Amino acid sequence: MTRTSFTWITWHYPTTQTAGRRIAGKANSPITTEAVYRWATADTNDITAQVGRATVGAVTITTGLNIPLNAWAFTVMTYDETNGINIYNGTLTVAAAIASYTTQTIGSGATVDVNGPMGYGNEGDTTFALAYEGRIAFFGMWNRVLTLGEIIQQQWKPHVTSGCVVFQYPGSNGTGTQPDWSGNNNSGVVTGATVGVGVSLGATF
């Protein structure tokens, strides 16, 4: 099913920032503007995000985001066909805010989906060759664009709300199958990861 609007939310802790390493995304092909969507840390501390569209792909690249190493970052990507991709970032002490961009192309044509599983923390869905360098403590996906107010609420206390289709705390089940608390049974399998200390937030439920 192609999603024409969505929100991805994550708490992540980069220890190294290498261009092209995925935080979250779908498919196993290189970044293109027609066939894949993902976000990735760049070696400039910024985020690149792309969503495939039939005519011109949506592309957003942040500037001056400066996600620090060895610290928890709260990073959010939203997408819809009218507004394209927006990226928000916050920390354990600073509320999320929309980023500034060097590039923001909304694109045109129908949103293009690709066959393959949703994944986070790795470049490829089959080879698992270019893992995210650091830790990911939470990943959530909504099938709509959350408002900034809703994003900030999720920042301090992640919780299932309307439209939530994935809600996971990776590592909550060791390195085994990770449960999905959205109620949609989108559980996932950890491949090649180890369990570390998670982010310290308020009670989830």
Image (cartoon, rainbow, N blue to C red):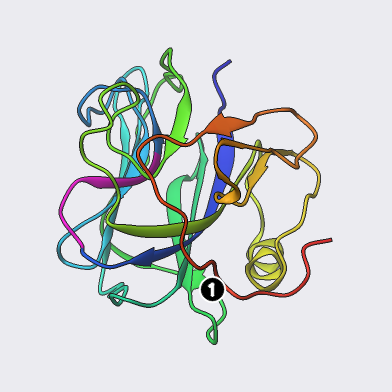
Q: Residue at x 64, y 63 (%)?
A: 151
- The reply to whether residue 149 is visible in this rendering is yes
Tell me: residue 41, above or below residue 119: below
Q: Quadrant of the N terminus?
A: top right
Residue 84 vs residue 155, the one in the foreground: 155
Residue 128 placement: quadrant: top left
What residue is drawn where x is 61% and y is 75%?
A: 200
Check residue 18 for magenta coloring.
yes
Magenta stretch bounds: 17-24
- 162 relative to 144 in the view: left or right: right
Q: Is residue 172 found left or right of 36 in the rendered image?
A: right
Classify residue 112 by image quadrant.
Answer: top left
Q: Residue 156 at what x, y percent from top left?
A: 67, 73
Q: Secondary structure at mark 1?
A: loop
Q: Is residue 89 above or below residue 47?
A: below
Where does the image place residue 153, in percent across and percent down from the top left? 72, 68
Please tell me which residue is depicted at 50% across the width and 68% down the height of the picture: 197
Q: In the rendered image of this protein, does residue 46 appear above or below residue 20?
A: below
Residue 174 in the magenta stretch? The answer is: no
The residue at the far bottom in this view is 93
The residue labelled by disc 1 is 96
Q: Quadrant of the C terminus?
A: bottom right
Q: Amino acid at mark 1?
A: Ala
Mark 1 Cα shell of 10 Å, populated few (<14), some (14-19), many (≥20): many
